[in-house]
Amino acid sequence: MQGENPVSREWERRWAELKEEISHCLRCPLSQTRTNAVPGEGSRGAVVFFVGEAPGEKEDLAGRPFVGPAGRYFDRLLPLAGLIREEVFVTGLVKCRPPQNRNPRAAEIRACSEYLCRQLELIAPRLVVPLGNFALKEFVGKKFSITQVHGQPLDKDGLRYFPLFHPAALFYNEKLRQEMEKDMESLRRYLRSFLSEQPGGKRTHTRPRSLKGDTR
Ligand code: URA
């Protein structure tokens, strides 16, 4: 089409190709038990990129992230950080549901990590928000624990993170509610300060070195 931006067209092509690959992926045994892969969704221009753990039952059925009870709570938390779902990007470490919602295995996370790296390269957000321990450890290192570092910014290899509890943590421990809500308010303040420090600043998130499967 005349006037169509070739850079944008190339981006759309790469994005569609990646989604297609994820949808038909056979890299790990989770492909045998999934109903649908859940590539993730959100804004192409997202400044904030949320990474959860793995799809649950509702996500597996819908092929969409965070549409179950944890997702509904996530949608209620986002406005506390001044955000709405449509302007962020949301995905998981692994794109297919582990049977009975068991924890994703190291080999499954490794098999899926290249997809996450490509998503980060394409979206190039300014801030990555690991949701829960699994994502935190993949991005910033095994020695970190979400109970210690939630709700505060963290820099690693020149990239910025703001770890939060996974929204499903509320269902295991109702006492976390207040802390989770406070963390979202901290995220709001943090976003306000660092976005005004460097308005329209450089989008830095490409491939975090810590993610396994990083082929740089
Ligand atoms: N990761 C999660 O934790 N939940 C989802 O819905 C998708 C990915």
Image (tube, rainbow, N blue to C red):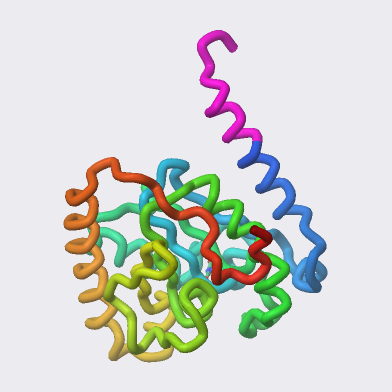
Closest to the observer: 206 or 147? 206
Q: Report if residue 98 is visible in the image.
A: yes
**Residue with the most extreme top position:** 2
Tell whether position 10 is magenta: yes
What x and y, as percent, mark residue 149?
33, 82
Left or right, 34 with respect to 181, comes to: right
Tell whether position 73 is magenta: no
What x and y, as percent, mark residue 99?
70, 79
Eyeballing the image, is 15 above or below 130?
above
Count of residue discs: 0
Residue at the image position 67 percent from the left and 47 percent from the top: 18
Closest to the observer: 45 or 58? 45
Which range is magenta?
1-13
Eyeballing the image, is 9 above or below 38?
above
Residue at the image position 73 percent from the left and 78 percent from the top: 107
Residue at the image position 72 percent from the left and 53 percent from the top: 23
What x and y, as percent, mark residue 75?
36, 62
Q: Report if residue 55 is visible in the image.
A: no
Left or right, 26 with respect to 10, comes to: right
Residue at the image position 37 percent from the left and 83 percent from the top: 170
Quarter occupied by the N terminus: top right
Left or right, 213 with respect to 149, comes to: right
Instruction: Name the dominant secondary structure of the magenta segment.
Output: helix
What x and y, as percent, mark residue 105?
68, 82
Q: Quadrant of residue 35?
A: bottom right
Quarter occupied by the C terminus: bottom right
